Image (cartoon, grey):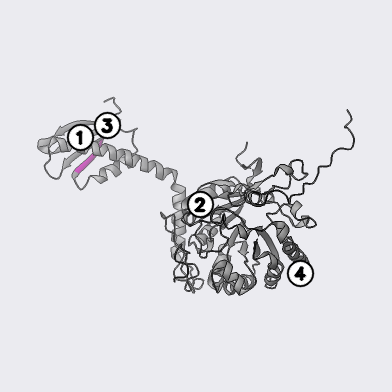
Amino acid sequence: MTTTRTQIETLDPAASSLTLSLDVGLYPREALYAAAYVFIDRAYLLLDRQDTRFVVHFRTKHPVDETVLRAMAGEFENELLAQALRHQVTDANQRIIEEVVAIAIAGAAGDPDGTAGAALEGAPLVALDDPDDGFVADPNGIARPWEPGKQGTE
Amino acid sequence: MSGTVVKLRDQWVEYADVLVDVMIGYACNVQCDYCSITDEMRKDNMAVAPVMAALAEARRRGATKVAFGGGEPTIRRSLLPLVRWCRDRGWTSIKIPSNGLLYSYRAYAEEAVDAGITDFHISFMAHTEELYARIMGREDALALVTEGVRNLKALGRKPVGDLIIKHDTWRHLADIVEHWAGLGVDTFNLWLVSLSDRNRDNLPSLPTVTEMRPGIAAAFDRGKRLGVTVRSRHIPRCMLPGYEDHVVDLRDDKVLVVTPRATFALWESRISPNAYADKCNGCAYQHGSCLGVRRDYLERWGDAELRPTPRCEPTSAPTAA
């Protein structure tokens, strides 16, 4: 096999099985695992390798016809692409993700002797994926953000 | 060009000299009557990750001075974790401009000091409960800010006061300085109210500097008598004759502003864009230590109050070597 394309090697509707092969240089192994994981509710999967190609064997859990098998091959290719991109983004942001998680863990831990936050409800937590990451809790409502139309009504 | 410099408008500046001013969000816990932040802008908040990414890059290039502004930064839960994060990564100057309300919680003030805030700036609106409440919209505003200042002082921190010059404060600037100086504040910055965005149509809020000059001069004089520093940040020196030494140019701060939508030098911001009037051409201070006058001021009042200083021309023709 010299092609770098992902291709269907075998397709057997009678056995509800499908075999794909793909170039090992095209996708990171992590992307392959992640894409395969997405299909484990629908099929039994076996990952293999032959020379420069990964080989993926599918056997669906329920009988399906050729159309469904071909669709599954297409979905798998799309999933591979999505997972490869996700892997790339994660790689690029790894350091920042670690820093943010460190902050979240430090915030969740609070102060060790339990005195500094006595007058405030809760420890300072950071919502990782929320641009409006929340506001400090305060017993007298001083920190409550002002909202248009609500002034003087509370 | 090396990676340790950044271009602020027309000049290259070492990152080590730059104050990276991050607007972490425009949300606020009060609605001051002169605030230029619109309801739409209040929804703009920066997520923690991009803030950290911007700071990590600036730090890598040598920056050590950071400010977290808003809106009101103290109401963000992420603020103190971010301050700690900066402190632990070599940021030696961490400035927080605030309305000061949250510091009325002793626990919060302690946590803020412990996290590593080095420069506490508080906007002091007034010196009386009535005026404070009218500007900020909270009856208890003066009491809370006073408590906040006391808490910070007890923790060994001396906040810097930011005062807004506008139609209902200029007559009281000297008394405002004296009031807060009495609580231990010894540095005050005077800022001219801005006719931009939400405050754009509030024309009465910005009288002429000529009209307000007696109040501004009184604040300088009172500060001198009390032994505290009072300086002006927005008004060109030619509009404050006799008090030129109190004028601090925005360019001196070398502020790089990072907002949810853009990054720019402070003097290019929408709130305080400065411009030269035609009559500034030829002034000795143009393109030097004076950045001109605020554009919104020029649009409102024109250039009649500007008094350019002629350049000193050589008295004789240069001689050939």
Q: Which residues are magenta?
A: A44-49
Looking at the rendering, in which quadrant would you find the N terminus of chain B? top right
> Label 4: how many residues lie within 10 Å, few (<14), some (14-19) or many (20+)?
some
- Residue neighbourhood size for the residue with mark 2, other residues' Cα within 10 Å, grouped as few (<14), some (14–19), many (≥20): some
Residue A19 badge:
1
Q: Is residue B178 magenta?
A: no
For the stretch drawn in magenta, the main secondary structure is strand
CA distance for labels 3 and 2: 40 Å
Q: Nearer the viewer, mark 4 or mark 3?
A: 4
Which type of secondary structure does the marked residue at label 1 adopt?
strand
Dot in front, 1 or 2: 2
Of all chains, the one bearing label 4 is: B
Q: Chain of mark 2?
A: B
What residue lies at 32% left-to-right and 33% top-to-bottom?
A: A24
Which residue in the protein does label 3 denote? A6
Residues at discs 1 and 3 both on one chain: yes
Q: Please name the amino acid that badge 3 sits on.
A: Thr
**Does the CB distance between marks 1 and 3 fall below 8 Å?**
no
**Number of the label disc, if any, that sits on residue B226:** 4
The earlier-in-sequence mark between 2 and 4 is 2
The foreground one among B96 and B4 is B96
Which quadrant holds residue B195? bottom right
Q: Which residue is mark 2?
A: B51
Q: Which one is nearer the viewer's eye here, B162 or B105?
A: B162
Say whether residue A46 is magenta.
yes
- Residue A49 shows in the view: yes
